[in-house]
Image: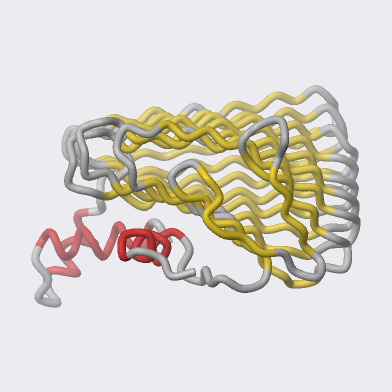
Amino acid sequence: MKLDTVTDSVLNVIDGSFSQSGAFNLRYNGAALCHSDSENIRIEKKTDNPGINIYISGSAQGETVHIPVVISESGMTDIVYNDFYIEDGANVLINAGCGIHNDGCGDSRHDGIHSFHIGENCVVTYEENHYGEGGGTGGRILNPVTRIFIGKNSVFNLNTSQIEGVDSTVRETYVELAEDAKVYVMEHLLTSGQQRAESNMSVRLTGGGSGAQIVSRSVAKDASEQKFHPKAIGSCRCQAHIQCDSIIMDNAKICSIPEIDAQDVDAQIVHEAAIGRINSEQLTKLRTFGLSEQEAETVIIDNFLK
């Protein structure tokens, strides 16, 4: 299917490897525009709620499924429920970027509620890029909810990124880990102007030998505001580490609240958080190479958010 220029452009930002081949589902302005299955991945439309069920066979090894969302209609509110059922032994990459192009005066909003039911001995990587653009005065709002249930000896990599242009976001994430399961979270966030961003995360380590690593890197510019509240709860022999690093600029505000809750003598949980301005020595060094102050700041921010 030939896509319009706006959709194509937004897809290039949120999912640069998207193509209409293999397993994919492109949601456009509240409806499935096109989709396809592969030998080991089946996508079915829900009958009770808007959204899809994605069934991933244990025979899926190194496969990718793309489920991007593009909204270009001003004033639209889109709510979608996607459930993933991943069989024992699967190894899969899931790309679920979401982009809003708003040229109008009404708020455009997407709320994606994703649930992952993961079997044993799986390796799952979930990539979610959020992006907003357009010349209208209407807001670009994204409120994702992610629920992840990780089976025995499985690994889940959660990589989220809010690239730019999102006016308001509230992210809710819940993770539960069985015996010897692991979760690795990497969150990148950039806000500017009057944008507001909140991320709440609860990770429950309920299986012996489970582990979690949660890393957040953010930059807040202008008068934007950010709040990050990750919580690790260990009720067994487990290990968890939370790290929050932020750069604050201009008149921005950042609130970081890492929380750890040990409910077992063998639960080892650590947290650390740091908020500060751009290092002046780094700025000076880059400017000696002929960069302007703004160019030097861009280089530092880009590398910090990698």
Image quadrant in which the C terminus is located: bottom left
Which residue is located at x 90 percent, y 52 percent? 120
Residue 224 pos. (x, y %): 25, 34
Asked if residue 43 is positioned above or below residue 295 in the image, the reply reads above
> Total of numbered circles in the picture?
0
The colour scheme used to paint the residues is secondary structure
Asked if residue 182 is positioned above or below residue 227 in the image, the reply reads below
Residue 268 pos. (x, y %): 75, 37
Q: Outermost residue, bottom direction?
A: 289
Q: Quadrant of residue 76?
A: top left
Pick whichever, 122 or 203, lies toward us. 122
Asked if residue 106 is positioned above or below residue 62 in the image, the reply reads above
Residue 168 relative to residue 193: left or right:
right
Pick whichever, 156 or 93, lies toward us. 93
Which residue is located at x 80 percent, y 58 percent? 56
Residue 64 relative to residue 195: left or right:
right
Which residue is located at x 45 percent, y 37 percent? 110
Residue 20 pos. (x, y %): 56, 71
Which residue is located at x 74 percent, y 72 percent? 62
Pick whichever, 31 or 220, lies toward us. 31
Residue 275 pos. (x, y %): 36, 38
Asked if residue 305 is positioned above or below residue 232 in the image, the reply reads below
